[in-house]
Image (cartoon, helix red, strand yellow):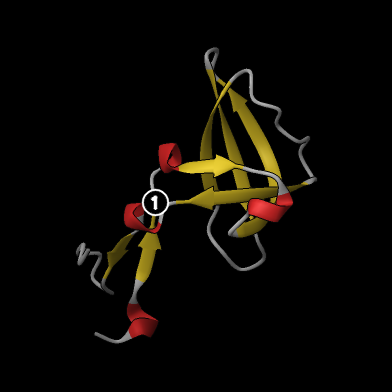
Amino acid sequence: ADPAGLTAGIRPEHLKLVPAGKAMLKAELRYLDPLGAETLVHLGQPNTALLTVRQTANTNIPEPGADAFVSFAAKNVCFFDATGKRIR
């Protein structure tokens, strides 16, 4: 498979906000969707799709515009080919 045609995806519940020293990814916090018991945290980087993190409402979440740091388990990443078919 051509790596340039791959898209990676991960479910919001498999992402976690972490301190900078434990992060696998840094992004700008764009906006929050408070939903009661949980909050959807929408992150972005230049020229990429938004990334959504699902956090419990009592989590310390930065303000929009701030840097946010994310970690995840590699086993939870899914890959899709250029047609959108899941390959892992």
Residue at the image point whose x is 70% and y is 31% from the top: 61
The C terminus is located in which quarter? bottom left
Residue 52 on image: x %, y %: 52, 43
Q: Is residue 79 above or below residue 54?
A: below
Looking at this view, is 53 or 24 the one in front?
24
Horizontal side of residue 69 vs 54, given as left or right: right
**Relative horizontal placement of residue 19, taking residue 47 as reference (left or right):** right
At x 55%, y 12%, the residue is 36
Q: Residue at left 64%, top 52%?
A: 22
Question: Dividing the image into 4 quarters, which one contains the N terminus?
Answer: bottom left
Residue farthest toward the front in the current orientation of the protein? 21
Say left or right for 64 vs 51. right
Residue type at mark 1? Ile
Q: Residue furthest bottom?
A: 2
Q: Quadrant of residue 6?
A: bottom left
User: Residue 85: x and y, percent?
Assistant: 19, 64
Q: Is residue 39 above or below residue 3?
A: above
State the residue position of label 1.
Answer: 10
Which residue is rendered at x = 61% and y = 68% of the image? 47
Q: Nearer the viewer, residue 60 or 53?
A: 60
